[in-house]
Image: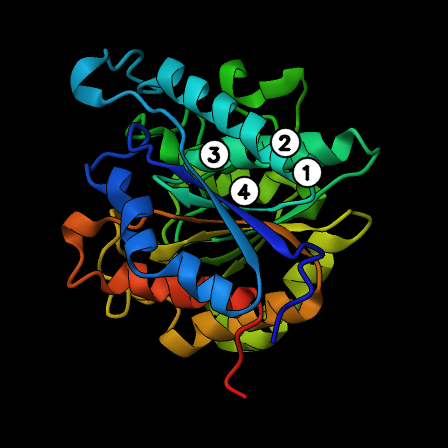
């Protein structure tokens, strides 16, 4: 069964960026996901898959770290700008962009590209951000200066101009069409920003009380209201570390295996998804590529794979 993603051709792009994270290893995430059979699994489902390779990313050993409040800012901006161009072009060529991270700062580039492509058609996009963390720090609030804790803030226009104004405009998405799902580890100053930003946030407590099915349906309705469709940003640390150990910032109490699949199945059923990214797979911290293999399963569920 093939999901209604509005595209039968998928463009896979690797973004092996680990400059935004505090631990090395996520630069190998895209390779781990490919090794777990992503392309062949999607092809077997009936999609035409084009793997466009990886964007070029500087290595931290050979480049200065820059400002302490936003480490490697220039290099991350350059990588995200290149990714944004590729994503925008893929959409214009009627491809479904599937981005493989890398740390979550790659979302700045992905969402800029998706937003830009639809903005040229006079349309807006929504975002469902599935993550243990809110990723809404700025250089002023971040306790670490790691940009992978800032991408969602940048996408709604808050943060360094080098990241907020790719393609020359901000914000890339209206906060009212942004939904956080599964958050359970939020910095104190960041929590205040989330509450005041206009985004909708469903914590793990909300999921415990309301159930994942209801939360995901509500999230997709909010993100999809008045938009051309929804970008799904899936950080593998949203899943409990018992199921996904190979992530840089694991937090106990995350989605179970079946909750993660249910979330992706509901994404597919909605018919709203227009692009997707899978980020924060860290093979260095994984066991027998378990996290990458689960990532492949979740992507295929989002694209239409079913039990029957």
Nearer mark to the viewer, of 4 and 1? 1
CB atoms at circles 4 and 1 under 8 Å apart?
Answer: no
Q: Is residue 142 above or below residue 91?
A: above
CB atoms at circles 1 and 3 under 8 Å apart?
Answer: no
CB atoms at circles 2 and 3 under 8 Å apart?
Answer: no
Q: Is residue 135 above or below residue 200?
A: above
Alpha carbons under labels 2 and 3: distance apart: 21 Å
Quickly name the residue at label 2.
89
In this rendering, would 17 be left or right of 225?
left
Point out the tag, 4 or 2, that comes first from the N-terminus.
2
Label at residue 222: none
Identify which residue is drawn at 61% across, 39% down: 196
Badge 4: how crowded within 10 Å, few (<14), some, or many (20+)? some
Quickly name the residue at label 1.
93
Label at residue 151: 3
Classify the position of the C terminus by image quarter.
bottom right
Identify which residue is drawn at 37% across, 74% down: 256
Label at residue 194: 4
Q: Is residue 116 above or below residue 68?
A: below
Image coordinates of residue 68 in percent, x first then y, are 28, 16
Alpha carbons under labels 1 and 3: distance apart: 26 Å
In this rendering, would 254 be left or right of 1?
left
């Amino acid at each position: 069964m093939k999901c209604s993603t509005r595209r039968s051709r998928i463009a896979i792009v690797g973004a092996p960026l680990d400059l935004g994270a505090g631990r090395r290893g996520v630069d190998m995430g895209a390779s781990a996901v490919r090794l777990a059979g992503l392309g062949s699994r999607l092809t077997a489902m009936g999609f035409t898959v084009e793997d466009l390779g990886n964007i070029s990313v500087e290595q931290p050993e050979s480049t200065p770290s820059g400002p302490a409040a936003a480490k490697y800012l220039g290099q991350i901006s350059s990588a995200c700008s290149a990714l944004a161009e590729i994503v925008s072009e893929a959409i214009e060529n009627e491809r479904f962009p599937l981005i493989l991270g890398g740390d979550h700062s790659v979302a700045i580039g992905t969402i800029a590209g998706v937003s830009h492509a639809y903005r040229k058609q006079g349309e807006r996009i929504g975002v469902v951000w599935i993550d243990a963390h809110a990723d809404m720090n700025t250089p002023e609030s971040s306790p670490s200066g790691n940009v992978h804790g800032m991408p969602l803030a940048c996408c709604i226009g808050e943060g360094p101009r080098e990241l907020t104004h790719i393609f020359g405009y901000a914000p890339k998405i209206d906060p009212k069409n942004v939904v956080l799902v599964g958050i359970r580890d939020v910095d104190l100053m960041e929590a205040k920003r989330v509450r005041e930003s206009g985004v909708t946030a469903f914590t793990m407590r909300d999921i415990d009380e309301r159930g994942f099915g209801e939360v995901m349906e509500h999230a997709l309705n909010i993100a999809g209201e008045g938009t051309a469709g929804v970008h799904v940003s899936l950080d593998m640390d949203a899943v409990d570390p018992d199921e996904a150990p190979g992530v840089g910032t694991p937090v106990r109490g995350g989605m179970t295996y079946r909750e993660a699949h249910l979330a992706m199945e509901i994404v597919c059923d909605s018919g709203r998804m227009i692009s997707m990214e899978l980020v924060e797979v860290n093979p260095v911290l994984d066991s027998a590529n378990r996290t990458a293999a689960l990532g492949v399963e979740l992507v295929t569920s989002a694209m239409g794979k079913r039990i029957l």
